[in-house]
Image: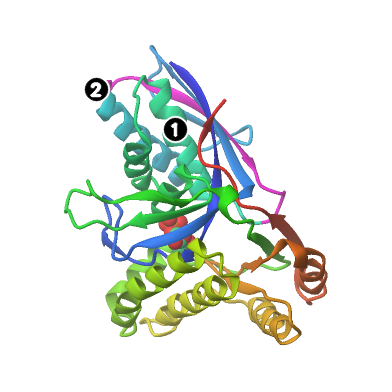
Amino acid sequence: MKATAKAHTNIALIKYWGKRDERLILPTNSSLSLTLDGFSTTTTVAFQEGLSEDQFMLDNQLVEGEAFRRVTKFLDLIRQLAGKEQLYAKVNSINDVPTAAGFASSASGFAALAAAGTKAIGLDLDDQALSRLTRQGSGSACRSIYGGFAEWEMGEQADGSDSFAVPIAPARHWDVRVAAVVLSSTMKKVSSRAGMKRTVETSPFYSGWIDSIPNDLKQIKEAIEGKDFEKAGSIAEANCLKMHATTLAANPPFTYWHDTTMRVMHAIQDMRADGIPAYFTIDAGPNVKVLYLPEDEARVKQRLSEISGVSGVILSKPGQGISYL
Ligand code: PMV
């Protein structure tokens, strides 16, 4: 009744931004990501007779409050699937995220928890079923079941049965690199959940976002297949800017960007003007991820490190999907 699994985080090139069902975590648009080898979570789940509740340790610290409740709620889904509603577990997670980088990820966390939890309780789910389940812990996590490029198909059904991720191309298909730019100061965070909700409900730009997704997905899949870096990078960057534009038009308006975020964005445009192909993408926070090719690694790292307000640059390659240890 014990299993250990490892999962990596992923960065969306076409963003998931908005839910049509908050409880089941069903998105209003399909999305596409690249799994990264740099940031992972390793989780052991041990179900034990005689426990009266779950226990969750993260990096060897006991977790309580909202983070604990999210884990227990997710274990409830696993218990229901297995028909073992009264069986509680000890969960031990270790995040392999460079310290203080501010990149702790719910994607690697819920993917590892889903894989270890289902295995520990004796369920044998295929990747599709595992992705569908993982989605209900954290939406973006459903893409981390797979290595390399994965698409989360939004689906149409009200019960979420057709909303899960599928593999697009494995990590070995294309060695695109990602630099995670760490900012020295942080700011008050609007959670992705709250940010999506406010945008869907109030932003007049939201319908434009939704309308533009099918073509972005079609184009980026062609670019990935043909390994066309300029095309893939420019679509990803434009898609990110569109997502962030929806927040500026929300009511009340908000942005995830920090002054350093803007400096990094400008620096990347300057790099392109100097002949270095590099593109940025930004999630629901101020940090920037930069896409580049292996041959430009030294130059990209150097240029990013020189930007005022940047405290670190973490380099990553395409990563693998779920593994069991
Ligand atoms: O899965 P969540 O709730 O962490 O939301 C992720 C949302 C974005 O990171 C902004 C986009 C994405 O597709 O990962």
Observer-nearest of 51 and 180: 180
Magenta highlight range: 84-101
Q: Helix, strand, or loop for circle 2?
A: loop
Circle 1/circle 2 CB separation < 8 Å: no
- Above/below status of 242 relative to 86: below
Q: Residue at x 74, y 82 (%)?
A: 275
Looking at the picture, how far across and down is residue 96, in whole percent?
Answer: 66, 42
| 98 in the magenta segment | yes
Q: Where is residue 175 in the image (x, y as percent from the top left)?
A: 64, 56
The structure residue drawn at horizontal position 43% and vertical position 60%, both measured from the top left corner, is: 32
Single out the residue that lies furthest toward the front: 226
**What amino acid does circle 1 point to?**
Ala
Residue found at x 42% / y 78%? 247
Q: Nearer the viewer, residue 311 or 242?
A: 242
Q: For the residue with label 2, is its CB less than 8 Å from the closest atom of ligand 1?
A: no
Residue 196 in the magenta stretch? The answer is: no
Report the front residue among 218 and 291: 218
Q: Which mark is residue 70?
A: none
Whichever of callouts 1 and 2 sits on the residue coming sooner in the sequence is 2
Q: Which residue shows up at 35% across the image and 33% down it?
A: 126
Q: Is residue 158 above or below residue 256?
A: above
Kindly identify which numbered label has been placed on residue 115.
1
Please rate how many residues cluster around mark 2, counting C-alpha atoms within 10 Å: few if below 14, some from 14 to 19, many from 20.
few
Q: Which colour scheme is used?
A: rainbow
Rendering quarter of residue 301: bottom right
